Amino acid sequence: MKSLEKSDPKFLELNTRLTEIDDIESAAALLHWDQATYMPAGGAPARGRQLATLRQIAHEKFTDPVIGQLLEDLKPYEDSLSYDSNEASLIRIARLSYNRSVCVPASFMAELSQHRSASYEAWAKARPANDFTIVQPYLEKTLDLSRELAGFFPGYEHIADPLIDFSDADMKASTLRQIFSRLRQELVPIVEQITSQPAADDAFLHQHFPETKQLEFSRRIIERIGYDFKRGRQDKTLHPFMTRFSTGDVRITTRVYENDLGQGLFSSIHEAGHAMYEQGISREFEGTPLASGVSSGVHESQSRLWENLVGRSRGFWECFYPQLQGVFLRELGNISIHKFYRAINKVARSLIRTDADEVTYNLHVTIRFDLELAMLEGSLSVRDLPEAWNERYRSDLGLVPATDSEGVMQDVHWYSGVIGGMFQGYTLGNLMSAQFYETALNINPEIPVDIERGNFTSLHQWLQENIYQHGRKYTADELLERVTGSPLSVEPFIRYIRGKYSELYPM
């Protein structure tokens, strides 16, 4: 077996070039973070140009034939070294990314980047104005660009497959349709059973909760569970997100509604879950394609695990509810922990995905996924999207949005990205979170006891050792098999839902 010295000139050159590209992409990410947080509105046109320039430079540098030749020269090491070795993994992942990137012209990437920035600004105006016509032409162009992007990858089974592959490698529309169909088959009867019963009273969560107090409490919570503020920060934005510039700078954003206690709190825990994943990646991978999450599904599994399986658990609030009552004594002083626990786990048919409970959430994702495929296939025009959206909500959830702001414009994804591959990761993440957590509990049954005591070290360390540190070293399928011993399965999630909610709502 050949050995690869880290001082090998070609390996060093590859690393140097990859780090330079990562620096450029991090600079672009910083500009995007600024645009979504503090940038004045007047900076939007120039910001779109700046982002397009940086992303075009990064794309051109990564698709430079010199990198292709370096990867070719290093391929014997990739083939002969242990699959688990960091060096072989770096070469393998860089090669996969390179082979995909060379299919897309740099000029197209620049055009797409500039359009995404302009589209985001249009959405930021259209949503509060409840005026879909503002963003419609931008979304029509996004659809054209999304189809063009998919067309750079011939031989696909479905036009959405290359776009899905960007976020969740090796996943296909046909596989996802099967997963979603199986989930829907299981979840719809559960939703029917629960929603036929009296709903939990959550009115007390919608009193006036001052923003500063909410942010202060949320900060205490996410720092306690493991988010490192020495390597991160939290700011406000229109649509919460996490962004990484390095393992030493992983930032999160949130939004706070003073009439909704759960919104800011759980979005903070959610984004902290993403950030803890990125903060936990091996520092040896810094500046390389290995220094990121495996896929949108695996990434979402970490945010949903902390938000729902931990953050909405009874044990979690046995520890933190007295503290929350102390902050909001007038509002919550007379509310029992049982009533609070039922309220934060209320199951109800709703219009807003980010507000949806664990039981109905995946139905929201299925709607978006199906609409994406219809637009890409050409059976649904952007002009008719609001009506199609409303009809699906009527048929699937028995509700119709009163406005496009709470309907087709509620999510930022299509207005700041592409159409295709934008939403499936949320459901994949829900499934994986249950599968990972079930495995963690089987190995260490004391984790729930630790959580009730406010000690998250055992769970955090288990995730660090089994998931975080590996970054992008393994595929999602490989990671699931390594950690849980099984391929992706719907069953752990269904067991979790039935177990938790049968205690709250007799089934």
Image: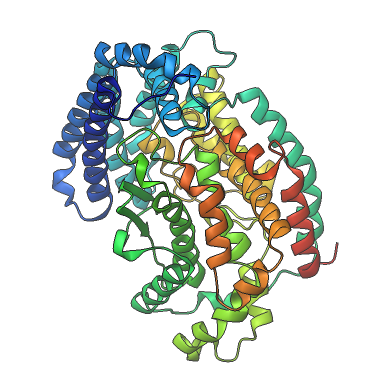
Q: Is 78 on the left or on the right of 439, as rendered?
A: left
Q: Is residue 230 above or below residue 116?
A: below
Displayed quadrant of residue 17? top left
Q: Residue 481 placed where, x, y %? A: 66, 37
From the viewer's side, name the closer residue of 276 and 349.
Answer: 276
Q: Is residue 2 visible?
A: yes
Q: Residue at x 34, y 42 (%)?
A: 123
Q: How many marks?
A: 0
Q: Is 467 on the left or on the right of 176, as rendered?
A: left
Q: Residue 499 placed where, x, y %? A: 79, 61
Q: Is residue 359 visible?
A: no
Q: Residue at x 51, y 68 (%)?
A: 262
Q: Residue at x 39, y 66 (%)?
A: 256
From the viewer's side, name the closer residue of 484 and 63.
Answer: 484
From the viewer's side, name the closer residue of 43 and 300.
Answer: 300
Displayed quadrant of residue 95? top left
